[in-house]
Image: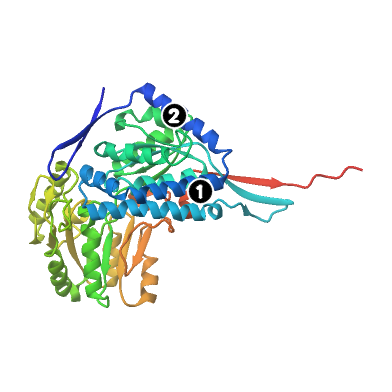
Amino acid sequence: MGMFTSINPFTQETIAVYTAHTPSDIEEKLALGHKAYQTLLSVPLEQRRQWMMQVAKSMKDQADAHAALITQEMGKTLKEARAEVLKCATSAEYYAENIAEILQHKTISSDAYKSYVAYEPKGIVLAIMPWNFPYWQVFRFAIPNILAGNTGLLKHASNVSGCALAIEKIFSESGFPPGTFQSVLVSSKDIEPIIADPRVQGVTLTGSTPAGKSVAALAGKHIKKTVLELGGSDPFIVLKDADLEAAAKTAVQGRMQNAGQSCIAAKRWIVEKEIVPAFTAEVKRILQTLHQGDPTLESTTMGPMARPDLADDLARQLRESINQGAILELGGTHEGCNFAPTLLTGVTNRMTAFKEETFGPLAVIIEAANETDAIALANETEFGLGAALWTSDLDKAARLATQIESGNVFINAMVRSDARLPFGGVKQSGYGRELSLEGTHEFLNVKTVYIQEAAVSH
């Protein structure tokens, strides 16, 4: 019988041990999830909306308890954890208000008396989700899918099983039919039978590119639709006409929040050469005000990384980059999961910190000769999730945005996901979209209905 252990990243103390679900447990969950889907087919949209508003209310009422659980299991600060819980709640409200419009039939003129596209639910959607935003990653798939009439089955990262079960409880206590949203505690190696099950109609995965390849291959074998949101090595381009102070402040926030453990963190700061000295001085000043430590304390601005092996891997990437000629400006030390905010300058496209995704509090400055060079450096990666571009010339920004190979380009702002906007990547960052109209339609049957007037017999 497998076990999943939750360990507090800051103290390394064991919080809880969870027993893995057996094949018969999983069969029960699949049967219940399918039954819930059949029940939801006859539940009016207005009722589903009311239940989802109850989900939002429950999360707001218990925000502190949910935040404490997140912080205990994966280490982000309580302030960040609370913001994550509230983002889920406001997104639930947003979709409850807008779902009717998102699901509205789309009329298309043809030779028919009437022809339209309908968006209809298909069944259970399996979500394989990561630990870095243990509530938000789950809710952004669950909210629109469940409102649309699908049901959700979550296989969460094994270090956040407590979060997985807490989310299941939120849905079960908000009025939805039993089985509408369930968590299944299984390891990745036991996932294929679930993907293969005919009641499962699609798989959404947020995680590493290797995990995405593995799940996409399994899903393809069983003809299951997938949405993959994978790694990123997001460029943060600062042109010489940018608002330097605002760019520096956002660069630090975009790299260091959640201890740098975000697929859309600002991982490569690409700066035009004229402003490299001024930009470096400003980000260094801001980085020195950060306080890494106990995530439960109000004074802490950055918590630990989620696991010791992740911190060790970041230390390797840092070491290799320094050996390749990068200059350590700040930080560079770590103990267990506690990794100091770190800054490297003089990073080039031949170095590890440029070529690999760095998942932790490591900021790097890459010098660009001019804006053409900056765009070329930004695109010189296998990833294409998000990108930020800083310039005071908005016409130029709009022109350059078309040249950046990524699923999201944010001008003079930090890359983030927003319930109102579709989110996803290109290249090795995956395919398909989450959120907004495009994301909601991913796991629906996009059904063409063609109505010809019956001939009148005489």
Element type at mark 1:
helix
Seen at 40% across and 55% down, the residue is: 90
In this rendering, does residue 328 appear at all? no
Q: Amino acid at mark 1?
A: Arg
Residue underneath mark 1: 49
Q: Quadrant of the C terminus?
A: top right
Q: Position of residue 117 (x, y in %)?
A: 61, 49
Of the pair 84 and 331, the residue shown nearer to us? 84
- Residue 30: give its label: 2
Crowdedness near tag 1: few (<14), some (14–19) or many (≥20) residues, C-alpha within 10 Å: many
> Disc 1 vs disc 2: Cβ atoms closer than 8 Å?
no
Given this view, does label 1 or label 2 mark the residue nearer the observer? 1
Q: Is residue 385 above or below residue 155?
A: below
Q: Position of residue 203 (x, y in %)?
A: 41, 39
Of the pair 142 and 456, the residue shown nearer to us? 142
Q: Amino acid at mark 2?
A: Leu
Q: Position of residue 348 (x, y in %)?
A: 17, 61
Q: Quadrant of the N terminus?
A: top left
Q: Earlier in the sequence, mark 1 or mark 2?
A: 2
How far is mark 1 from mark 2, CA to CA? 24 Å
